[in-house]
Image (tube, rainbow, N blue to C red):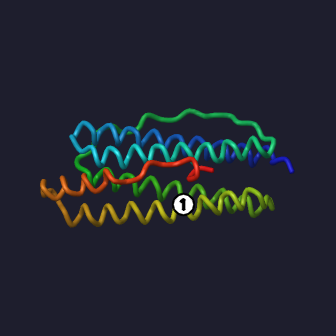
Amino acid sequence: MAIKPALAEAINDQIRAEFQSAYLYLQMSAWFTEQNLPGFAHWMRTQWQEETLHAMKLYDFVHQRGGAIVLGGIDAPVGSYANPLSVFEKVREHELMITDRINALYERALTEKDLPLQIVLQWFINEQVEEESQVMEIIDRLKLIGSDGPSIYLFDRQLATRPAATAGEGA
């Protein structure tokens, strides 16, 4: 069953949002590198990889359903932050916005009775629950740590152990 053009357009917009997320996290990774926090930078770079895989999951889905891909522009992200906590608070805000977008797209798939899209979006809904939880855990730890240098250093080392994103996460 071919995807309806209006749904393909809505998915293209979500692809743009996923690439915007990737771009944001890559910029955050650069900021952390500049702050000499390689573990935080690694965490953000891994998040960049995940978001790129998410975009490609939707990209492939549109193609499999006979839809057209139309890539939209993405905005330059903010490049400077006050501290690690402010970065992750921005991440939380951004992920909540992405969750709202995914939920709205799912509601549209329900209205349009597009079962394949509903199934794909269920994966994204579950992924958003996981991502929001991870970010809140980091925010909570950063609030406990405060500006204590040795604690930031130890947390940076812990974040460096995050496994790299794999194609299975986006497939």
Residue for point 79% across, 43% down: 5
Residue receiving disc 1: 127
Left or right: 157, with 1 as reference point: left
Q: Quadrant of residue 67?
A: top right
Front residue of this view, candidates 137 and 113: 137
Which residue is found at the position 58% from the left and 52% from the top?
Answer: 168
Q: Is residue 40 left or right of residue 153?
A: right
Counting every numbered tag in the picture gives: 1
Mark 1 Cα shell of 10 Å, populated few (<14), some (14-19), many (≥20):
some
Locate residue 110, reporting x and y percent.
75, 63
Residue 48: give x, y in percent of width and height: 45, 44
Residue 43 rendering spot, x and y as whole percentages: 36, 49
Q: In the picture provided, is 60 more to the left or to the right than 135?
A: right
Query: Where residue 36 sits in the image (x, y, percent)?
Result: 21, 40
Residue 156, placed above or below residue 143 = above
Picture residue at 59% right of the left edge, 62% below the top: 125
123 with respect to 78 (left or right): right
Dot 1 falls on a residue whose secondary structure is helix
Q: Is residue 20 above or below residue 140?
A: above
* Front-most of residues 148 and 12: 148
Q: Amino acid at mark 1?
A: Glu
Q: Quadrant of residue 76?
A: top left
Which residue is painted at 70% across and 36% down in the image?
69
